[in-house]
Image: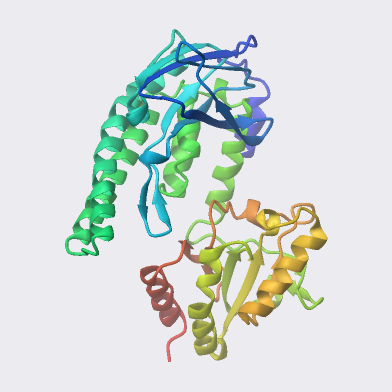
């Protein structure tokens, strides 16, 4: 990776991004008085622009981008939302690549994700070759979601497992189509953007191979450099790699050092006080800790409070300490601090909770994203293998 980064400095960019800005003209039939929301990155932050149609029914959106990016557009029509109790499912979003170019979008507001997108910009048209397949996947997935919601509202659970399995198959097929697009378009900026969204479904080796295949003249872009850092982090936490050593002050004011835990089985639990699934997983995790602590298990909770209420570090620390006390989780704890040692970044955390299991030899043996009964059983099985009776 270091060698690649050095070479980047001497390459002439293949992609020269225009600076005059973008103009997106959207005409949705059946839009009525509903607004349209466009979500995208601006100055390093996710931004939402709420748009309204003019008297001619045209939604005009103008702005400027530093680099191409994937935009998410949705019609804010509450009648399209599917509800089951307090839970809600929204229709698929219209996703497209945007550059500083002229774009025309036409379609039906009731099925915005299937809208037609026209532009003379090659980056935009390249991505549209993939979106033809995405529309089919989205339409099929949305119909299945409608069926699930209908059955749940009718308290009919018969066959829901089969429908969920069909949804899973569609998602995996869509992932494969995206990967084939990336393999076929190494000189397209769209490939960088798509690859950035596949970290959760691609092995570190496959991710590295595809990243290396991207045209080198694109790799001096901000998106490619950020992707390169993620690729490197992802490889460092791959199964069989040595754990990333760290030493930070714990919740009790004492040092928490991985070096002091040599010979133990270590579970790193990336969580947050604001994360409902994280905290719902704590009771089951407490049971495992009680069972395996005497056999050599140690848990280090690494809380990222950047998303909790309150922006100051003092407020974040207060939320962290309160959650630990409320949940009664008495293992080791550190608070992620991007200014001191950003463990969330070095471990390439893309969602919460994320757990890493490290064996007695100090190597990664398991990575789990999310929480469910099945994932908990996977963790318990691995613990029993590493620490048998």
Q: Quadrant of residue 191?
A: top left
Compared with 383, 195 (above or below) is above
Please state, as top left, top right, bottom left or bottom right, where the C terminus lies in the image.
Answer: bottom left
Residue at (66, 64) in percent of width and height: 303
Residue 348 visible in the snapshot: yes
The percent position of residue 185, horizontal first and vertical second, equals 40, 23
Residue 355 visible in the snapshot: no
Compared with 119, 231 (above or below) is below
The percent position of residue 175, horizontal first and vertical second, equals 34, 40
Q: Which of 35 and 264 is in front in this view?
A: 35
Residue at (65, 11) in percent of width and height: 19
Q: In which quarter of the image is residue 110?
A: top left
The percent position of residue 167, horizontal first and vertical second, equals 27, 49
Please state, as top left, top right, bottom left or bottom right, where the N terminus lies in the image.
Answer: top right
* Horizontal side of residue 362 vs 343, given as left or right: left
- How many marks the image carries: the answer is 0
Compared with 181, 248 (above or below) is below
Residue at (60, 55) in percent of width and height: 347
The percent position of residue 337, horizontal first and vertical second, equals 75, 57
Colouring:
rainbow
């Amino acid at each position: 990776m270091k060698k690649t980064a050095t070479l980047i400095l001497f390459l002439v960019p293949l992609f020269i991004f225009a600076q005059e800005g973008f103009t997106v003209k959207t005409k949705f039939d059946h839009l009525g008085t509903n607004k349209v929301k466009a979500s995208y990155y601006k100055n390093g932050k996710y931004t939402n622009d709420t748009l309204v149609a003019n008297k001619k029914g045209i939604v005009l959106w103008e702005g400027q981008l530093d680099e191409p990016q994937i935009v998410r557009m949705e019609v804010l029509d509450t009648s399209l939302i599917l509800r089951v109790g307090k839970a809600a499912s929204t229709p698929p979003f219209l996703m497209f690549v945007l550059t500083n170019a002229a774009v025309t979008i036409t379609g039906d507001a009731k099925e915005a994700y299937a809208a037609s997108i026209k532009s003379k910009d090659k980056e935009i048209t390249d991505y549209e070759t993939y979106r033809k397949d995405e529309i089919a996947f989205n339409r099929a997935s949305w119909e299945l979601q409608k069926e699930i919601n209908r059955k749940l509202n009718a308290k009919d659970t018969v066959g829901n497992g089969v429908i969920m399995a069909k949804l899973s198959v569609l998602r995996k097929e869509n992932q494969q189509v995206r990967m084939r697009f990336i393999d076929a378009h190494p000189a397209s900026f769209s490939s960088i953007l798509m690859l950035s969204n596949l970290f959760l479904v691609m092995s570190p080796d496959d991710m590295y191979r595809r990243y290396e295949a991207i045209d080198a003249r694109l790799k001096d872009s901000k998106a490619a450099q950020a992707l390169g850092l993620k690729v490197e982090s992802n490889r460092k936490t791959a199964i069989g790699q040595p754990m990333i050593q760290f030493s930070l002050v714990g919740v009790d004011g004492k040092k928490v050092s991985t070096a002091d835990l040599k010979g133990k089985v270590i579970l790193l639990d990336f969580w947050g006080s604001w994360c409902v699934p994280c905290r719902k997983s704590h009771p089951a995790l407490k049971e495992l800790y009680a069972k395996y602590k005497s056999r050599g298990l140690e848990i280090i909770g690494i809380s990222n409070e950047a998303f909790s209420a309150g922006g100051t570090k003092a407020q974040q620390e207060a939320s962290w300490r309160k959650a630990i006390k409320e949940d009664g989780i008495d293992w080791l704890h550190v608070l992620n601090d991007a200014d001191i040692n950003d463990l969330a970044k070095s471990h390439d955390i893309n969602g919460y909770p994320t757990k890493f299991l490290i064996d007695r030899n100090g190597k990664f043996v398991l990575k789990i994203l999310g929480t469910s009964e099945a994932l908990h059983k996977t963790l318990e099985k691995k613990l029993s293998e590493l620490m048998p009776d």
